Image: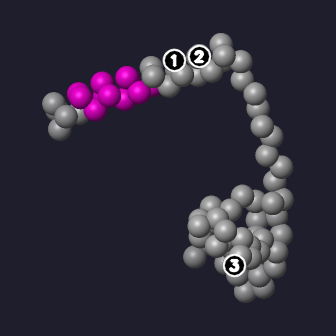
Amino acid sequence: MKGEFQSLRDWWGNREEGEQAWRVSFADLEKNGFNLDVKNPHVVEVERGYSSVELLGMLHDSFKKSDELLELLKKEGVNG
């Protein structure tokens, strides 16, 4: 089984903490409602601020893409 999971298989036999593997305490999991979506402590998240004009543009693009997808679904529903 070579391919995209080979590095995981290699690591599995000799598991150590690193950039892509870290420990999370039971207490932390319990405090977070057992949500396993724990952020990687090795990656610094950069918070980006947007102006209202940028946000409106992003919202407009999102609505436009949604409209395109809805049209595609309508056409597929008629033809499918």
Q: With respect to residue 53, does 46 lie above or below?
A: below
Q: Is mark 3 on a helix, strand or loop?
A: helix
Question: Residue 9: x, y in percent?
Answer: 67, 78
Q: Is mark 1 on a helix, strand or loop?
A: helix
Q: With respect to residue 5, does 9 lie above or below?
A: below
Q: Can residue 9 be seen in this view?
A: yes
- Is residue 7 found left or right of 74 in the rendered image? right
Residue designated by label 3: 26
Q: Nearer the viewer, residue 7 or 28?
A: 28
Q: Is residue 6 visible?
A: no
Question: Residue 70: x, y in percent?
Answer: 32, 28
Spatial separation of the CA atoms under disc 1 and disc 2: 5 Å
The structure residue drawn at horizontal position 76% and vertical position 59%, both measured from the top left corner, is: 40
Amino acid at pointer 1: His
Verify CB contact (< 8 Å) between mark 1 and mark 2: yes
Between circles 1 and 3, the one closer to the viewer is 3
Amino acid at pointer 3: Phe
The numbered disc on residue 60 is 1
Q: What stretch is highlighted in magenta?
A: 65-75
Amino acid at pointer 2: Gly
Q: Residue furthest front?
A: 31
Mark 1 neighbour density, 10 Å: few (under 14) some (14–19) many (20 or more): few
Question: Residue 48: x, y in percent?
Answer: 76, 32
Residue designated by label 2: 57
Q: What element carries label 2?
A: helix
Instruction: Tell me if residue 73 is in the magenta stretch.
Output: yes
Quarter-wise, where is residue 79 in the image? top left
Screen quadrant of the N terminus: bottom right
The structure residue drawn at horizontal position 59% and vertical position 16%, both measured from the top left corner, is: 57
Q: Residue furthest top?
A: 53
Screen quadrant of the C terminus: top left
